[in-house]
Image (tube, rainbow, N blue to C red):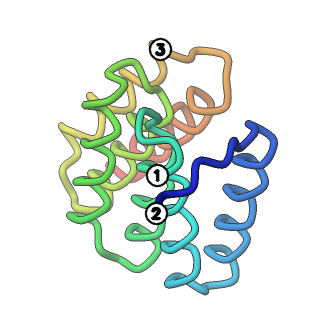
């Protein structure tokens, strides 16, 4: 018999924070496990998919990261968070055209928020490294 325990948004946030801490300390397997668990708990959310993509990105697996970001965008086509990270991975794959498009979309969707600021910074870097 499967367990059906309610989980709060605060608990999800704590799990995501734990996953990011593991990622920042390069415990990638642990981060992946945590984010995959959050994905199972919140299958309708793009956030754990983007988080899984960041684990791949941090390990230099840009194509895999892009795949996760695209899955996130399938769930939420308006995710500035996913578009900003997608643009970053595309930039690292040297696909400047796709990166610019993704980053501009993130900026358009979130002009004053965190994802928009991230996209704006990456676009500025792209201009510096022409």
Residue 80 left/right relative to 30: left
- The answer to whether the residue labelled 2 contacts the one labelled 1, judged by CB atoms less than 8 Å apart, is yes
Relative placement, left or right, of 26 versus 59 is: right
Which labelled disc corresponds to residue 36? 2
Determine which residue is flagged by label 3: 109
Q: Is residue 123 visible?
A: no
**Location of mark 1 (residue):** 39
Q: Quadrant of residue 97?
A: top left
Q: Earlier in the sequence, mark 3 or mark 2?
A: 2
| Distance from the alpha carbon under mark 3 to that under mark 2 | 26 Å
Tag 3, which secondary structure? helix
Q: Residue at x 51, y 74 (%)?
A: 33
Q: Residue at x 35, y 77 (%)?
A: 60
Give the residue drawn at x 78%, y 49%. 11
Q: Does the rendering let one see residue 37? A: yes
> Which of the two marks, 3 or 2, is nearer to us in this view?
2
Left or right of residue 70: residue 103:
right
């Amino acid at each position: 018999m499967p367990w059906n325990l309610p989980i709060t948004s605060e608990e999800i946030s704590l799990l995501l924070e734990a996953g990011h801490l593991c990622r920042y300390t390069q415990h990638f397997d642990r981060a992946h496990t945590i984010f995959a668990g959050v994905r199972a708990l919140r299958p309708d959310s793009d956030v754990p998919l983007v988080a899984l993509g960041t684990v791949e990105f941090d390990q230099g697996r840009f194509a895999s990261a892009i795949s996760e970001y695209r899955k996130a965008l399938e769930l939420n086509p308006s995710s500035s968070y996913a578009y900003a990270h997608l643009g970053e991975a595309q930039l690292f794959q040297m696909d400047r055209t796709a990166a610019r498009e993704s980053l501009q979309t993130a900026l358009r969707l979130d002009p004053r928020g965190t994802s928009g600021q991230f996209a704006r910074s990456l676009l500025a870097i792209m201009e510096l490294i022409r």
